Amino acid sequence: MSNPDIVIVGSGIGGATIASALAGSGARVLIIERGGHLPATPHARSTRSIFLDEHYRPKEMWREAGGAAFNPGNYYYVGGNSKFFGAVLIRYREADFSEMEHHGGVSPAWPFAYDEFEPWYSRAERLFRVRGALGEDPTEPRHSNPYAFAPVPDEPPIARARAELKGLGLHPASLPLGIDIEAWLKDGATPWDAFPNTGTGKVDAETGPLAEALKDDNIRLATGAEVEVLEPAADGRSIAAVRYRQHGERRRVTPKLVILSAGAVNSAAILLRSPAAGGKGLANSSDQVGRNFMNHNTCAMLAIDPRRRNASVYQKTLMLNDYYLSDGKGGRPLGNVQLLGKVDGNVLKAGARRAPKMALDFMARRSFDWYRMCEDLPDPESHVTVDGSDIVLQWRRSNMEPLQRLTKVMRENFRACGYPIVLDREFDKRTPTHQCGTVSMGNDPASAPLDPFCRAWDHPNLFVVDASFLPNSAAVNPALSIAAQALRVGEHIRKTELGG
Ligand SMILES: Cc1cc2nc3c(=O)[nH]c(=O)nc-3n(C[C@H](O)[C@H](O)[C@H](O)COP(=O)(O)OP(=O)(O)OC[C@H]3O[C@@H](n4cnc5c(N)ncnc54)[C@H](O)[C@@H]3O)c2cc1C
């Protein structure tokens, strides 16, 4: 497409969802995506390929400021990181939209309240065909519509785990999931969390909103096309062009509107690399682009009873929010607990290369594998910067106390449920799965690069619609909130730029 009205950079959750919201508007939309389509090969269901050989990880390296280079688990394919996601499509809790006091400081409010956002959550749940149940989780915010599909069923060992947790007076609840379990299992009896989706079993950005968007002939997808910079007009106010490289060739397009959706790290890097007066990059009069990088404080936790096997295949159907709004005794919030996809010996070996495989297999056959997620707070000194073409990530950790407290309370709970061995392992910067916050939205142009509709305060024809806009990380998975805001911004663009 040589003269699109709108260019969207990236086809992940933000980019694909806003493309679906623009379908049927008559606008000519070009989606420029760095990656290609994921091929269906045996690697896609092999834990050896995915976890031990790291077959799908990008070849790129990021650096720590003044430190070592590392290979991030950040995926470049049509559909972006969602091709690998655990498909947990959960709403932020209502309290996450207001300021909340944490052990490590204050989590800031959104520029609008939950009630304004609620209808967009409903639409996003329909678009991603979310399976779930209301009435199980006391922290579940108000829904104007019930889930359209029943939850993915617990496997028998997980049904037992649910009963055990209930027996302690806790409130285990079904994870809201974008998973068609029959379709997923038809291609192989494996979990889906961290596995690439090459079929239709997982509703990710490609199989959900992108498939809808591409039904419109006015919307085109260019793959293998990496955006290098955005080019400002002579007045510095509007964005004049998008420069990218496709299959070794340099290209330039001049749309009326640009929507940057390259993910929280890459969108910030593109803005910072782009030429602008003052040398601080685009959309950056606030000096906040790239700052406030957040990624959740997370930890895997294996609860093991050596006498009992866990024969589940996919496992990932339960969560626990009893410690989300407080520590359970009226103290400050701790976080969310949810199941991971079922691990095997290869998955464990990826984190313990020297351990004997037989011992890891023994452990994996008996473990119940949980994930603890606590809020990471925004900090201007936690940032993404660029050094030429290199990405430099300085993740300054915050609010670690809730993770330690949640470890302690969950270890006690699992022991009380009859699992004498409880092991845990923290995730670090090599796993930037829930990256967010680097180009945040807010009511004040002095402190946030984007307005509450994700339009750059500095450039009226630039929007940033991906995990970058999130003002806080909450302590739940981010994709549904990104998608809901993409739908909201899509409608705003239709009304304000495309005549309704
Ligand atoms: C293993 C794993 C499990 C996860 N599980 C969950 C979960 O269960 N629930 C949940 O809510 N979230 C989960 N996440 C996180 C979720 O996938 C992300 O929050 C979400 O995809 C972010 O959306 P985005 O639009 O910001 O970026 P992405 O979806 O990553 O999309 C960015 C897109 O931009 C493209 N791109 C990047 N740079 C350029 C460039 N220069 N030019 C052109 N294109 C570019 C990328 O290739 C990609 O397609 C998981 C992530 C991973 C990796």
Image (cartoon, grey):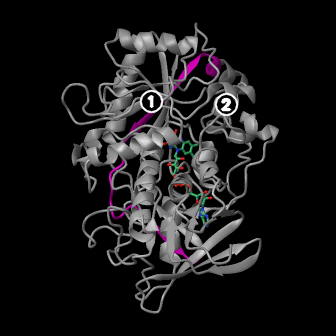
Instruction: Give SS at disc 2.
Output: loop
Q: Is mark 1 within 8 Å of ligand 1?
A: no
Horizontal arrangement in the rendering, residue 452 relative to residue 41 (left or right): left
Give the image location of residue 287, x and y in percent.
Answer: 35, 74
Give the image location of residue 285, x and y in percent.
Answer: 34, 78
Span of residues in magenta: 363-388
**Which mark is on residue 325?**
none
Magenta span includes 219: no
Taking depth in this image into account, of 97 and 395 the one nearest to the observer is 97
- Give the residue displayed 81% in from the left and 37% down from the top: 42
Taking depth in this image into account, of 245 and 160 the one nearest to the observer is 245
**Residues at marks 2 and 1, CA–CA distance in whole angstroms:** 43 Å
Give the image location of residue 338, x and y in percent.
Answer: 46, 29
Q: Quadrant of residue 15?
A: bottom right
Q: Is residue 231 above or below residue 134?
A: below
Q: Return the residue found at the far bottom.
A: 234
Kind of residue at badge 1: Tyr
Kind of residue at badge 2: Ala
- Give the residue displayed 74% in from the left and 26% down from the top: 186
Residue 174 visible, this angle: yes
Q: Which image quarter holds the C terminus?
A: bottom left
Residue with the mark numbered 1 = 147
Q: Quadrant of residue 349?
A: top right
Say whether disc 2 or disc 1 marks the residue closer to the N-terminus: 1
